[in-house]
Image (spheres, coloured by chain):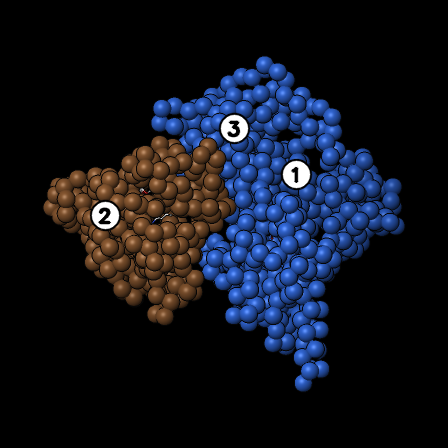
Chain colours: A blue, B brown
C-alpha cells in the first residue's frame, strides 16, 4: 500500500470508467462501461481517505464495509475485497453496475462536495467481476437441515433470500412465473447496462449450491401460497414478486398502436430478444421513427437508449418536471444524452393522436411549471393554461412506474395489504400477517432499487432461518 | 415436462393436443388459458385450456394454425415436449345456475367456449350451443357439445353442414323463440361484436372471451389491454371474459392488426415443418 498522505491523496484525480464511444455503442447492445483494469482500480482506491467516520458506509443501504474493501483494493488484495463486500451484498456485480451510488455511498463520501467522490460503484464492479473470473468454487453449504423453503419470484430479493437460506442448509426452490429467471434483471434492465451473462453466472452459482429453479410457475394460479405450505410441504414461503403492473397515463389515445408500457417494450426486446434477427416476437418498427418516452427514471432511460440502438430517427424524453428532479441514476442520464437522446422537460402528454388504422402519429404536450414541493419534497408540476402543442411521434413509451401485481395477492386473501396493494411486513424480518410467510423487495416497498430488494431478501432469510430453527427445536421438544 | 400424449386433427388446420401437465390440470377452471412457447427465441402465445383431466394429469388445447407459432405447435407429435407452458392464467368464467344459457363458438372459438359450456351444464343450466364455420371441414366438437347441450345449432357459410348462414342468424332465432338468461361467445372479433348487437335489444347479459395480443400473460406488460365501458383492463388478469355490451370491439380488432406485416413476413420465411420440429427438439 502506498504511503501517500491524506493531502497527497486529495490531490489525485478521479479515475474515470473506461467506456465505449457513444458512436460505437449506439449501434449494438454490448455493454457500455468497459470496467476498470486492476491498475485503474488500485489507482482509484488510492484516493480513499479512510475517514475515521466512514459516511460512505452509512450511505449504503446494506452497510457494506466500504472502507475495508477499498483498502484491500488499494493493496491489490482483490479476492479479500470481494469477501468483504459479499458479507453484506450478495449481488455485487449487479449492484456495482446499477445502484444509484450518487445518492448512496458516493453521495455520502467526504469528497462528494468537491465533486470527487470515490467511484465506489466502479470499484465494487471491478472486485465482483474479478472474483467471478478467478474464483469458480461456489460457497460451501452446510449439511441439510431437512427444512424446505419456497421462494416466489426470482428477482434480486428472491435470489438474495435463496442464497442465504441455502447457506443455512435449507432446501430452497425458487418459483418464477416467466420462462427465464432474474426478475427485472432479466426482463427489464437491458444488456448494454447489465449483461445477461452476469445474471446467469449468479444463477449458476445458486444452482451449484443446490437451489432449484422452477420456471413457468405462476404462484397463485397454479400452486397457491397455501398449497406450497400445506400440500407441497414447504416449511416457509418468501414472496418477492416485484411491482410488475405497469401504470399508464390515462389520457385519450393511449390504446393506439405504437403506444407501449416500458415493461412491454423492454420485455419484447430483452426477454423475448425481439432485436435478434430470427426472434419470433414482433416489435413495432422503430428504425427511422420518432420515439418519445414519458418519464425520467431508470426505466425511461433504458427504454430510450434501447430505442436509440434500434435505430430510431429521434428519441425524446418528455418529463413533467425539470432535469434536477429526474429520478434516474446520473450515469444513465449522461449516457442517454451522449447517445443522442433529447430531453424535453416541463411537459406532460395530454392526448395522443393516430391515423385511420389506429396507429400513433402525434402527441399533444402540455407546458408545465414547477409549483410547491409535494409530500416527498419534490416540486410538483402545474399546467400552464393554453400552452399545448403537438409533436409528431410514431412510437410512445410510457415509463411512469409500476404498481404491485395483484395476481398472487388475490389468491392469498389473508395476506395483509396496504391501500397501495403492497404487502405489509415487519421491516426487520419481512414477516407478513400470515404465519410462515415472509415478503420483501418491490412487492413491499413499491418500485425501488436492486440493493433494497436484495437487503430485504437477506433480512427475511435471517428471519426465516430463525423461524425454522425454532420450529425444529419445537419439534424436538415435542418428541 | 409438458409431453404431448395425444395429437390429432379435429378440423381443417385445427389440431387437438393433449399434454401432460398435472398441476395445471388440477387447477384449471373453465375460461382459463395457458401461455406457450415452443422454441428458443420463440414467442409466447395464449391458448385456451379446452379440457382438463386431473386424474390423468393432462390438459387439452385446440390450436388453429394461423401463423408461425401455431404452425410449429401443430406440427409437434406424441412424445414431443412443449418448451414452456405456464398456467392456468386468467380469471375463470363465471359459472353458476343462470337458467338457460346460449354458448356461441365461431371457428376455433368453439374450443374456447366448449369448457365453459361443460361447466355451465354441470352447474345445472340448460345449455343451447351454437357453432359456426366456413364449411363442414372447419367444424369440430359437435358430438362433445351435443353431449352437454339441450340444443345444438350448426351453421356454415356454404351450407355444407347445418344451416347456411352465420351464428348470429341462429342466435337471433333462438332468442326470438326462447327466454334466455345469459349468452357467452368466443370467436373472431367481428363475430363477437355481432353477437353483442343481436343480444343487446333483449337485454340479456352477454359475455365475450376476448383474444387480444399477449406477451407475458401475467399482467406485467399491459399489451393485452382492452377497453370496456371506457376503462382499460388487462385481459390476461381481469379477463379474458368481459361484458360484451361494453367492450370496444373496433379497438380490439385494430390492435390485433398491430403486427400484420411482421407476421406475414415471418410466415413467408418459415422453414419446412420437419426442420422446425427438429429445432424444437434440440431446444428442449
Ligand atoms: C427497466 C428497469 C430499470 C431499472 N433500473 C434500476 C437501476 O438501475 N438500479 C436499481 O437499483 N434499480 C433499478 N430498477 C428497479 C429494480 O430492478 C427493482 O427494484 C428490483 O428488481 C426489485 O426486485 P424484486 O426482487 O422485488 O422483484 P423483481 O425484480 O420485479 O422480480 C420479481 C419476479 O417475480 C416474478 N413473479 C411475479 N409474480 C409471480 C408469481 N405469482 N409467481 C411466480 N413468480 C412471480 C416476476 O416474473 C419477476 O421475475 C429498474 C427497474 C426497471 C423495471
Ligand atoms: C385468451 C386467448 C385465448 C386463445 N385461445 C386460443 C385457442 O384455444 N386456440 C387457438 O387456436 N387460438 C387461440 N388464441 C389465439 C392465438 O393466441 C393466436 O392465434 C396465436 O397467438 C397466433 O400466433 P402465430 O404465431 O401462430 O400467428 P401470427 O402470425 O403471429 O398471428 C396471427 C394472428 O394471431 C393474433 N396473435 C398474434 N400473436 C399473438 C399473441 N402473442 N397473443 C394473442 N394473439 C396473437 C393476431 O391477431 C395475429 O394477427 C387465443 C388468444 C387469446 C388472447
Ligand atoms: S399479456 Fe402482458 S399484461 Fe397481459
Which residue shows up at 27% across the image and 64% down it? B6
Based on the displayed image, in which of its 4 quarters is residue A103 positioned?
top right
Give the structural element (helix, strand or loop) at label 2: strand
Return the residue at label 1: A329
Q: Position of residue B219 (x, y in %)?
A: 49, 46
Which residue shows up at 51% across the image and 24% down it? A351
Return the residue at label 3: A251
Residue A82 vs residue B253, the one in the foreground = B253
Q: Spot the residue most to the top.
A: A386
**Image depth: mark 3 or mark 1 in front:** 3
Q: Which mark identifies residue A201? A: none
Q: Spot the residue most to the bottom.
A: A479
Chain where mark 2 sits: B
Chain where mark 1 sits: A
Residues under numbered marks 3 and 2 in contact, where contact means CB atoms less than 8 Å apart: no
Return the residue at label 2: B131
Of the numbered discs 3 and 1, the one sitting upstream in the chain is 3
Give the structural element (helix, strand or loop) at label 1: loop
Decide: is A21 above or below B10: above
Give the structural element (helix, strand or loop) at label 3: loop
Which residue shows up at 55% across the image and 38% down it? A247
Asked if disc 3 is less than 8 Å from ligand 3, the answer is: no
**Is residue A334 visible from the viewing direction of this image?**
yes
Q: Residues within 10 Å of mark 3 (few under 14, many from 20)?
A: few
**Image depth: mark 1 or mark 2 in front:** 2
Side of A261 relative to A11 (left or right): left
Asked if disc 1 is less than 8 Å from ligand 1, the answer is: yes
Are labels 1 and 2 assigned to the same chain? no
Q: Residues within 10 Å of mark 1 (few under 14, many from 20)?
A: some
Residue B277 vs residue A74, the one in the foreground = B277
Amino acid at each position: 500500500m502506498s504511503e501517500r498522505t491524506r493531502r497527497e491523496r486529495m490531490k489525485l484525480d478521479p479515475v474515470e470508467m473506461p467506456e465505449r464511444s457513444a458512436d460505437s455503442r449506439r449501434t449494438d447492445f454490448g455493454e457500455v462501461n468497459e470496467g476498470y483494469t486492476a491498475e485503474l482500480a488500485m489507482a482509484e482506491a488510492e484516493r480513499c481517505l479512510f475517514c475515521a467516520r466512514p459516511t460512505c458506509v452509512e450511505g449504503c443501504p446494506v452497510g457494506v464495509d466500504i472502507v475495508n474493501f477499498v483498502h484491500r483494493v488499494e493493496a491489490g488484495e482483490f479476492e479479500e475485497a470481494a469477501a468483504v463486500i459479499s458479507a453484506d451484498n450478495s449481488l455485487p456485480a449487479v449492484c456495482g453496475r446499477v445502484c444509484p451510488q450518487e445518492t448512496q455511498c458516493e453521495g455520502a463520501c467526504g469528497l462528494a462536495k468537491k465533486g470527487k467522490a470515490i467511484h465506489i460503484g466502479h470499484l465494487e464492479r471491478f472486485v465482483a467481476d474479478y472474483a467471478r473470473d478467478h474464483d469458480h468454487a461456489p460457497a460451501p453449504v452446510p449439511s441439510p437441515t431437512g427444512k424446505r423453503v419456497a421462494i416466489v419470484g426470482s428477482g434480486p430479493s428472491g435470489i438474495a433470500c435463496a442464497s442465504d437460506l441455502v447457506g443455512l442448509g435449507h432446501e430452497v426452490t425458487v418459483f418464477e412465473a416467466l420462462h427465464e429467471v432474474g426478475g427485472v434483471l432479466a426482463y427489464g434492465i437491458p444488456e448494454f447496462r447489465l449483461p445477461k451473462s452476469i445474471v446467469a453466472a449468479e444463477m449458476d452459482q445458486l444452482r451449484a449450491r443446490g437451489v432449484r429453479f422452477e420456471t413457468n410457475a405462476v404462484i397463485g394460479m397454479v400452486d397457491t401460497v397455501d398449497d406450497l405450505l400445506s400440500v407441497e410441504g414447504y416449511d416457509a414461503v418468501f414472496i418477492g414478486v416485484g411491482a410488475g403492473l405497469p401504470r399508464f397515463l390515462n389520457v385519450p389515445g393511449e390504446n393506439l398502436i405504437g403506444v407501449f408500457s416500458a415493461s412491454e417494450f423492454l420485455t419484447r426486446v430483452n426477454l423475448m430478444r425481439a432485436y435478434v434477427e430470427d426472434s419470433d416476437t414482433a416489435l413495432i418498427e422503430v428504425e427511422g421513427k420518432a420515439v418519445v418516452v414519458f418519464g425520467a427514471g431508470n426505466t425511461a432511460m433504458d427504454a430510450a437508449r434501447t430505442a436509440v440502438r434500434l435505430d430510431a430517427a429521434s428519441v425524446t424524453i418528455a418529463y413533467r418536471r425539470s432535469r434536477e428532479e429526474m429520478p434516474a441514476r446520473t450515469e444513465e442520464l449522461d449516457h442517454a444524452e451522449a447517445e443522442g437522446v433529447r430531453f424535453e422537460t416541463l411537459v406532460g402528454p395530454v392526448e395522443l393522436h393516430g391515423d385511420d388504422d389506429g396507429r400513433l402519429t402525434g402527441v399533444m404536450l402540455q407546458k408545465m411549471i414547477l409549483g410547491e414541493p409535494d409530500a416527498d419534497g419534490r416540486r410538483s408540476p402545474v399546467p400552464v393554461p393554453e400552452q399545448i402543442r403537438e409533436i409528431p411521434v410514431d412510437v410512445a413509451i410510457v415509463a411512469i412506474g409500476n404498481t404491485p401485481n395483484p395476481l398472487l395477492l388475490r389468491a392469498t386473501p389473508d395476506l395483509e395489504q396496504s391501500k397501495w396493494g403492497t404487502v405489509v411486513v415487519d421491516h426487520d424480518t419481512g414477516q407478513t400477517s400470515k404465519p410462515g410467510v415472509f415478503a420483501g423487495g418491490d412487492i413491499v416497498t413499491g418500485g425501488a432499487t436492486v440493493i433494497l430488494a436484495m437487503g430485504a431478501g437477506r433480512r427475511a432469510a435471517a428471519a426465516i432461518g430463525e423461524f425454522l430453527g425454532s420450529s425444529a427445536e419445537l419439534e424436538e421438544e415435542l418428541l | 415436462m409438458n409431453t404431448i400424449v395425444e395429437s390429432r386433427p379435429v378440423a381443417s388446420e385445427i389440431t387437438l393436443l393433449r399434454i401432460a401437465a398435472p398441476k395445471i390440470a388440477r387447477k384449471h377452471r373453465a375460461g382459463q388459458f395457458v401461455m406457450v412457447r415452443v422454441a428458443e427465441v420463440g414467442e409466447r402465445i395464449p391458448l385456451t385450456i379446452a379440457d382438463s383431466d386431473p386424474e390423468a394429469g393432462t390438459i387439452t388445447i385446440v390450436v388453429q394454425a394461423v401463423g408461425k407459432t401455431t404452425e410449429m405447435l401443430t406440427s409437434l407429435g406424441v412424445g414431443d415436449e412443449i418448451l414452456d407452458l405456464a398456467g392456468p392464467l386468467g380469471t375463470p368464467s363465471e359459472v353458476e345456475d343462470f337458467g338457460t344459457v346460449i354458448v356461441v363458438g365461431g371457428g376455433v372459438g368453439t374450443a374456447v367456449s366448449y369448457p365453459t359450456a361443460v361447466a355451465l351444464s354441470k352447474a345445472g343450466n340448460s345449455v343451447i350451443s351454437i357453432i359456426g364455420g366456413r364449411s363442414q371441414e372447419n367444424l369440430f366438437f359437435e358430438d362433445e357439445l351435443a353431449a352437454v347441450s339441450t340444443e345444438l345449432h350448426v351453421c356454415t357459410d356454404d351450407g355444407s353442414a347445418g344451416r347456411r348462414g352465420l351464428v348470429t342468424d341462429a342466435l337471433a332465432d333462438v332468442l326470438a323463440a326462447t327466454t334466455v338468461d345469459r349468452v357467452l361467445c368466443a370467436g373472431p372479433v367481428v363475430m363477437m361484436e355481432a353477437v353483442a348487437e343481436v343480444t343487446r335489444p333483449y337485454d340479456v347479459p352477454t359475455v365475450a372471451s376476448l383474444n387480444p395480443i399477449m406477451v407475458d400473460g401475467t399482467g406485467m406488460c399491459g399489451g393485452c389491454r382492452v377497453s370496456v365501458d371506457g376503462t382499460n383492463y388487462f385481459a390476461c388478469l381481469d379477463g379474458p371474459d368481459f361484458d360484451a355490451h361494453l367492450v370496444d370491439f373496433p379497438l380490439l380488432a385494430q390492435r390485433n392488426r398491430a403486427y400484420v406485416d411482421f407476421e406475414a413476413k415471418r410466415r413467408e420465411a418459415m422453414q419446412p415443418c420437419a426442420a422446425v420440429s427438429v429445432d424444437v427438439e434440440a431446444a428442449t
